[in-house]
Amino acid sequence: AIFSRNGGFMGIGFAIPSNMAKSVMESLINHGKVVRGWLGVSIQEVTQDLAKEFGAASTAGALVGDIVEDGPAAKAKVQRGDILTAYNGTTIRDPGHLRSLVAETAPGTDVTVSVFRNKRAQDLRVTIGEMPTEFATAGRRGGAGSKGDHALAGVTVENVSKQSERFGRSTVQSGVVITNIDADSPAERAGLRSGDVIREINRKLVKDVRDFERLTSQLRPKASVLLLLHRGNATIFLSITPDG
């Protein structure tokens, strides 16, 4: 949530911070719908090992793993392997912090994104886009830092039709493909992978992003989730149990 390739942005029916609630209300008044900003990148946590590999002094920020072709970040020349360190002057703590900052930015807004690339810092000017309807992220219940995360928190997906050619899955016509998974999330620890196609959640059919959002919004904290996945040439079940 994406995400994602977009690094993950939204959930439906989850408690949200007051500043995001204000943004949602203004969006409904001005546009008649919820409009969220979109950067068009897949991001991940900067671990100690990754910071060392990239020559970064700390683990703050968000590491770019992939970029949506012709998305806002791609047009601004963001590159895979960049560590995004600041957003319009605000230091980025982690991927979740960046997602919130972007989601609360009105599409069409020009922002300055600071990146750490090849052991050097530089600023890029990015025009934030509007979150496409085919992207979604399973968010957190109870806001940042909540202990009530459900089993699919931090999993970003998009409609499989958008990714069929990329992953060589012409036979898969419905479902959602995972484009990003938060580091050290229950889903990652259970073995869920980017590129997996989710076909069912708790034995209920997932045809597209709307189904994914609806079903993940119904998940209870600490409850196990049974997924039916298409991975490579195989169809498998995978059970995920969130932190207790």
Image: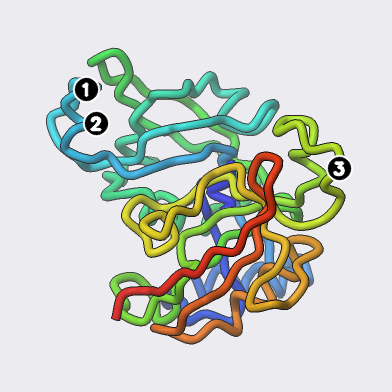
Q: Is residue 106 above or below residue 147?
A: above
Residue furthest to the left in view is 57
Q: Is residue 17 left or right of residue 57?
A: right
The spot of residue 76 in percent (x, y) is 55, 23
Is residue 107 visible to us here?
yes
Residue under the point 60% across and 79% down: 217
Tag nearer the camera, 2 or 3: 3
Asked which quadrant contains residue 179, the reply is top right
Residue under the point 23% across and 40% down: 47
The residue carrying mark 2 is 50
- Which mark identifies residue 90? none
Q: Residues within 10 Å of mark 1 (few under 14, many from 20)?
A: few
Q: Residues within 10 Å of mark 2 (few under 14, many from 20)?
A: some
- Which mark identifies residue 53? 1
The residue carrying mark 3 is 171
Q: Amino acid at mark 3?
A: Thr
Residue under the point 46% across and 69% down: 240
The spot of residue 50 in percent (x, y) is 24, 31
Marks 1 and 2 in Cβ contact (< 8 Å): yes
Asked which quadrant contains residue 74, the reply is top right
Rounded to the nearest whole Å, what is the CA distance between mark 1 and mark 2?
Answer: 5 Å
The residue closer to the viewer here, 146 or 91, is: 146
The residue closer to the viewer here, 83 or 158, is: 158
Asked which quadrant contains residue 17, the reply is bottom left
Q: Amino acid at mark 1?
A: Glu
Provide the secondary structure element on which disc 3 rests.
loop
